[in-house]
Image (cartoon, helix red, strand yellow):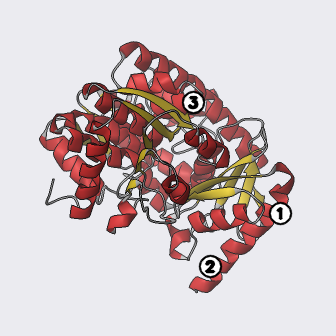
Amino acid sequence: MEDKVPSKLLTTLSKAADIVRGHDFIQVFSHYDADGVSSATILAKTLLRAGKEFRVTLFTTLNDYNMDVIRNTKADCIIISDLGASYIDQLDEMDCDIVVLDHHTIISEAKRVCYANPHLYGIDGMTSGCGATMCLLFSVTMDENNWDLVQIAFAGIAGDRQHINGLSGLNTYLLEEGTKRGYIERMQGSLIPAGDLQTELFLVTDPYIRGVSGSVEGVAKLMSDAGIPNGKTFMDLTEEERRRLSSLIAIKLTEQGVQLSSMNEIARDRYYLTGMKMDAEYLSAILNNCGRSGIGGIGIAAGMGDERCINEGAKQNQESAKLVVESMVDLDRRGLTQMEHIQWFDSTDSGFTGMLCGIAMQSIGDHSKPTIGMNKSNDPVNLSSRGMWCQLDRGVDLAKAMREACASVGGQGGGHKIAAGGSVPLDRVDEFLQNLDRIIGEQISSAM
């Protein structure tokens, strides 16, 4: 590991391992998305094997309210994964031992907290190392025998879409080790979804195919046009059938306005988890759905290999997939509200804000503008934002933009350049949108 991981990161990870070894009970806080649940699962398995007692708490976000939860925790040792970058200064003020394993944009460096973040070592945490990556590196620092947990790390990598343009940085090291040790197998990707074609084409939102996704009639026509009989799975298709179906999907996506770069991302390589006998993206979807559905414990148990929880998580994931595609069809019908530099939608009635935001940006939105989703079910309002690589090339930085726009109305925000989130007071949403639109415009102007 010494020749693949920066020496300063290794030093931090060794310090983190020593801190944890010195405690009998550890409180873990993590995010509730796929990367956060994967991170929590790796930590839970690591602590269990080390003979430690522990408790895991998942947060929808780290805000002032949840910082108070952390402050009031009756634990002498805390690990925070896939969260924490925006609150390092406040965490530094606490008396207990704290380890932060995050990958979001650096706000400040730690003085007392043991803080590992790819950005601190010149590695892009948006593309080259997620929360689960950092947790896996911590885990194998604790015990070299924990390399089997690289399978769970790949669910986090897939959940944060760090594999769509090819693996890089720390993730490449995880692939090398996972492949060498027999835990990971790379598979060629396709525009065609895996599994039973009638079911998966109906549920597919990556990509969302207008007139096919969420439409029994649309799926039947597409299959008929491709000359494929009912009841076939992706693996059943001949090379000619795959070529015909892929071509028809590509034509539909092109007519829909989906960019070629997005289609290349959709046809990305996949990673098979040999010990869990499933694709990393499938495990990622299960963990993500469990976390976001309020059953994070089932998600963590599924990631740890419990068959009953895997089956329950898969069942819940399919039910959620139906709701997501229905919500996406409805959003496609309603369209996005356009402003000068951003586009937005309200997902209060449907939920799935972050998921819909990513799907809309890729499949139905104006590719020159970041997409903002909001859920007004609670006060403060939860926000998600998604961009595209072509926007980043023009100067867009959603991490900064969301942080500034949310703060301007008394909220909190942050994340990555291409994907960020936040929360703002309900009565100041319009002001937030106006400020964000202005900030994005300023970013683009200053980059010209």
- Residue 328, position as x, y percentages in the image: 66, 40
Q: What's the distance in space between the residues labelled 1 and 3, CA to CA?
A: 33 Å
Left or right of 300 on screen, residue 324: right
User: What residue occupies the far top of the structure in this picture?
Assistant: 308
The answer to whether the residues at label 2 and label 3 have Cβ atoms under 8 Å apart is: no
Classify 10 Å Cα crowding around label 2: few (below 14), some (14-19), many (20 and above): some
- Residue 448, position as x, y percentages in the image: 58, 86
Q: Is mark 3 on a helix, strand or loop?
A: helix
Q: Which residue is drawn at 27% across and 40% down?
A: 139
Pointer 2 or 1: first along the chain: 1
Give the amino acid at mark 2: Ile
Depth order, front residue of 87/331: 87
Classify 10 Å Cα crowding around label 3: few (below 14), some (14-19), many (20 and above): many
Depth order, front residue of 57/259: 57
Q: What's the distance in space between the residues labelled 2 and 3, CA to CA?
A: 35 Å
- Image height check: is 86 above or below 323? below
- Return the residue at label 3: 321
Give the amino acid at mark 3: Ala
Q: What's the distance in space between the residues labelled 2 and 1, CA to CA?
A: 20 Å
The answer to whether the residues at label 2 and label 1 have Cβ atoms under 8 Å apart is: no
Q: What element carries label 1?
A: helix
Classify 10 Å Cα crowding around label 1: few (below 14), some (14-19), many (20 and above): some
- Image height check: is 114 above or below 201? below
- Return the residue at label 2: 444
Q: Residue at x 51, y 43 (%)?
A: 206
Callout in the foreground (1, 3): 1
Give the amino acid at mark 1: Glu
Q: In which quarter of the image is residue 352?
A: top right
Q: Is residue 276 visible?
A: no
